[in-house]
Amino acid sequence: MTTDPLVVFTPSGKRGHFPLGTPVLTAARQLGVDLDSVCGGRGICSKCQITPSYGEFPKHGVTVSEGALSEWNAVEQRYDDKRGLKPGRRLGCQATVQGDVVIDVPPESQVHRQVVRKAAAARSITMDPATRLYFVVVEEPDMHSPTGDLERLERALREQWQIDAITADLSLMSKLQPVLRKGKWEVTVAVHRGHKDEVAQVVEIWPGLHEDGLYGLAIDLGSTTIAAHLTDLDTGEVKASSGLMNPQIRFGEDLMSRVSYAMMNPGGDQEMTRAVREAINDLTTSIAEEAGIDAALIVETVFVCNPVMHHLLLGLDPVELGQAPFALATSESMSLPAREMELTKMNPRAQVYILPCIAGHVGADCAAVALSEEPGKSEDLVLIVDVGTNAEILLGNTSRVLACSSPTGPAFEGAQISSGQRAAPGAIERIEIDPVTKEPRFRVIGSEKWSNEEGFDQVVATTGITGICGSGIIEAVAEMRIAGLLDESGLIGSAEQTGTPRCIPEGRTHSYLIHDASAEGGPRITVTQGDIRAIQLAKSALYAGARLLMDEMAVDTVDRVVLAGAFGAHISTKHAMVLGMIPDAPLDKVSSAGNAAGTGARIALCNITARAEIERIVRQITKVETAIEPKFQDHFVAANAIPHKTDPFPELAQVVTLPAPSFNTGGGDEGSGRRRRRRS
């Protein structure tokens, strides 16, 4: 057994043991970690920046001490003096391994930058934002009428726009008089008034007529990805969408790992809060640059997030969310100044609104999905599944709406998969396997051509074929089941059993070879038995959560299924059914809603009436707690089979025939089941 230190890289999850003194960049390259460098390790380009993390990491089974990396050296100091390094950052070419360590590779240090898979969906929204622009003509001061400039601005807003009362903080007051005089008493003001506010607040003022617009951010703060939509507060138009990895992933891929980190490391919650706020500040700057606007014109931000992200964003200790009864510090919506959350890259007087949480494990992101998809207004019974590292599930109609969360883990995002990576150019995102020849063909992000089409190699020459992302691994497992490479239990057969040399031995199990460029120094992309198990665990948790809601509703079928999130937009309904990720339903009744949580955030950003509406709706949603419901485990175990041990999936049988191989010595059990129907 090796005594060399263990190095764990996040967000990829790749790990390995390396001798003392190994440069981090060398370890990354040997493991195939996506860490950039163009200067040959001389500390010049700074593209190999990394962030080490210290403390207890139960998820990784490692404790990281302060001396896990070599001391700060002269090369790093020289670069920091000239260009600056963010606090906590090191240069991967200079820092060497001195002990067990967890290392985060930030987005800007990755060669293959993530593609935002949560693009804004087209949506008609009635515009009624909390922050609006008003052009006013203010009465000039007079010796015989000794009122202050703010009071005369207030009178102008009351007389010209029927805004009764205003307030302004000291930073706005300091610029009020110069701006009034520069504009010759004609000014434009941005006024914020939330749906619960008695008094409006002036958040910005410009001389004359301001015509450069006013903007807000709708942010879906997920466990793995932060997605933002820069929105025009006058028209509702999305000017830019951008995203990045949640840097908290280095503290744990799933929510409970982060709660554990906070429990076991004093100040760990503050560390995670600081990391996510810095990421949001970076995202604000980059999305403003992308849209070509001044970031100071961003005057409002709406957040949707799960309960753990909610607490860590606000700087609240999430420990209570890790143990029954999973108590929230607050479940109500929140309105507060952005500066209280250290969001400093937008307007200094910008306001933040956070949607309400439904319960301890069902957060504001689920509330946003309910706002966007309106299950409570559906005449038929609709199941809405928002898949991510933590799945949010809604089931309902006009009579009743139920909600639960299900811990699917990061596998659907491509994390903890042997050849997995985030959605970036070069990642395999679609795959088909010929059921006769067992040969694969695939598409990568950045190319519309399949790998067996002429011109494919030329198209992917710049990006290469780098790995497989979440949508790719899901389709790969489903296609392997259709092609007979997997049995019902998820076991990969040998070359003799499957009839293809692509099934190769790997220890006591087998893996399926998709692409091999090792001869040219490229990656060898396989689906391993461990990958299959990771997907089985994720899909079983998802299916079990949905079935639990159906049990509570006393039904065995749903009328339609809506897939939300990045998964819903990029996975075919057929592959979802083959895997058994969702309960059986007619394929023409399974649709995609795109990033429904992000859409809900945009609706709340653009319409304050919608904020009052969702605050009312969440009080009417019934929460089902998967963590303490005994039937969840029963459904979970049955769902480990592909597609399912007991559910016959008759709708799926109409579009695809699943072979029934058994690679277990004792043979397989296909199970039995009846056609499920609504219970009386």
Image (spheres, rainbow, N blue to C red):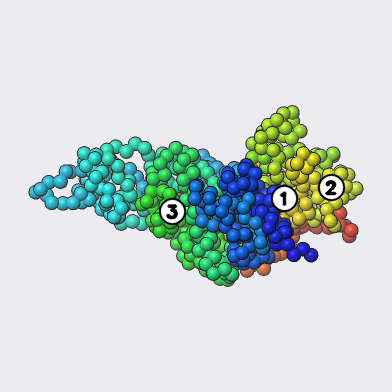
Looking at the picture, how far across and down is residue 407, in whole percent? 63, 59
Residue lying at the far top in this picture: please name it.
454
Which amino acid type is marked by label 1?
Answer: Gln
Residue lying at the far bottom in this picture: please name it.
324
Secondary element under disc 3, as helix, strand or loop, is loop
Label 1 and label 2: CA atoms lie apart by: 25 Å
Q: Which mark is residue 503?
A: 2
Label 2 and label 3: CA atoms lie apart by: 51 Å
Residue highlighted by disc 1? 30
Looking at the picture, how far across and down is residue 567, in whole percent? 63, 47
> Which residue shows up at 69% across the image and 48% down it?
29
Looking at the picture, how far across and down is residue 452, in whole percent? 76, 33
Check whether the beta carbons of the residues at disc 1 and disc 3 lie within 8 A of each other. Answer: no
Image-based side of 416 in relation to 360, left or right: right
Q: From the viewer's side, name the closer residue of 11 and 46.
A: 46
Q: Tell me if residue 212 can be seen.
A: yes
Residue highlighted by disc 3? 343
Check whether the beta carbons of the residues at disc 1 and disc 2 lie within 8 A of each other. Answer: no
> Which residue shows up at 59% across the image and 65% down it?
66
Q: From the viewer's side, name the closer residue of 439 and 577.
A: 439
Q: Tell me if residue 554 can be seen.
A: no
